[in-house]
Amino acid sequence: MLLTGATGFVGMEVLARYLERGDRPVYTLIRAESDRAAQERLDAVLATLFGPRVPGRHAERVRAVAGELTAPHLGLNRTRREDLARQVTTIVHSAASVSFTLPLEDARQINVGGTRRMLEFAELARELGGLGRYGHVSTAYVAGTHAGRFAESDLDVGQRFNNSYEQSKFEAEQLVRAQPELPFTILRPSIVVGDRRSGWTAAFNVLYWPLRALARGLFEAIPASPSAPLDVVSVDYVADAIYELCEARDGIGETYHLAAGAQASTMGEVAQLASGYFRRPAPKMLPPAEFASLSPTVAQGSAFETGSAYFPYFSINAVFDDAATRARLEPAGIRVSPLRDYMDRLLDYATRSRWGKRPIARSQAQPV
């Protein structure tokens, strides 16, 4: 199988599933100038996942391929590209820019352009090697500004977008859906946080920003609606789901919401859980327009600027219907957990690692 995004948070967890639960060779497309440099990046990921002494059976089965997602032919020469295509029966395309602040054209170059190149490779693999599955990791937030139920079959419902990330991922999905002969499965995680057993995370963004601000007592108020759903899922659930859905025989042409759905928290609940953990007063929740009229103090200024990219997610009114996903995953024993069940573990890890300034490897973060 071929995996893109193996150096990213979700991608490395997907890589771990393929190494731990299967025996096929795994190829990882990694941005680098040479295979040696790509292998060094991959070795660092393996050390984070499994410890500095990576079990031989894992290291021997995974290979780094130096390439460029947005370059013609993925930056591979014809011979290598065709050799790889003949060997690949499963592709999981997880690589993406997750920045909310990139200019739209830059986000498109990576998320849309990269998907276009992967689709070209997938077609070659289908012709030469019999591709059985193309797993496309998108985001539930292709829903953009849509309010109310957003079904797994929905895509264009007339929504606008909060940032270039949402819009570019929406456009990438359109490309995938325009390939009816491709055996694709679209996977849409919502807000992904750390492992629900150990709290481990490699990415401190979105939800972690207001949590850290609360820990520091930085804001007395945040732009949020207490009743707004905040759909959060743990990275282990997302990786388990991707592996299961991409390895199953059925599901071709389907879209799955890897979301909390009916189990989603609200902003009010999250604020209460976090304020209880840090023993600080819960911040006031103000309508976004009212919050925007406030003048931040000098101490708040930089945090305000950093956090503004995440503000829209604290007052979103979309509800992600995950009925098809639950019907597929629950018989396999894969179930989403409400955030309240593991919030303390997320915060324990965040504070122990100083919010990422003192990283703790996944292999060293012990499940509770």
Image: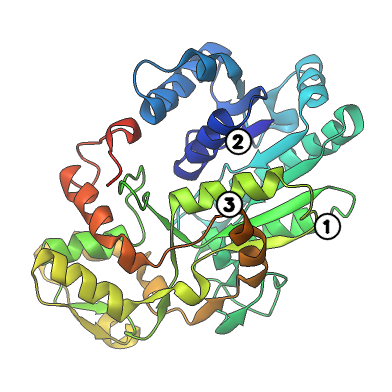
| Front position in the image: 89 or 181 | 89
The residue to which callout 3 is attached is 241
Asked which secondary structure carries label 3, the reply is: helix
Residue 268 relative to residue 28: left or right: left
Amino acid at pointer 3: Ala
Label 2 vs label 1: CA separation?
21 Å
Q: CA distance from mark 3 to mark 1?
A: 24 Å
Quick one: SS at disc 1? loop
Q: Earlier in the sequence, mark 3 or mark 2?
A: 2
Q: Earlier in the sequence, mark 2 or mark 1?
A: 2
Q: Is residue 158 above or below residue 237?
A: below
Mark nearest the camera among 3 and 1 is 3
- Whether pointer 2 and pointer 1 mark residues with C-beta atoms closer than 8 Å, the reply is no
| Mark 2, secondary structure of its residue | strand
Quarter of image, res 364: top left
CA gap, disc 3 and disc 2: 17 Å
Residue 178's tag is 1
Q: Position of residue 284 (x, y in %)?
A: 19, 83
Label ID, residue 4: 2
Please give the label number shown on residue 203.
Answer: none
On-image quarter of the N terminus = top right
What's the amino acid at mark 2? Thr
Q: Quadrant of residue 256?
A: bottom right
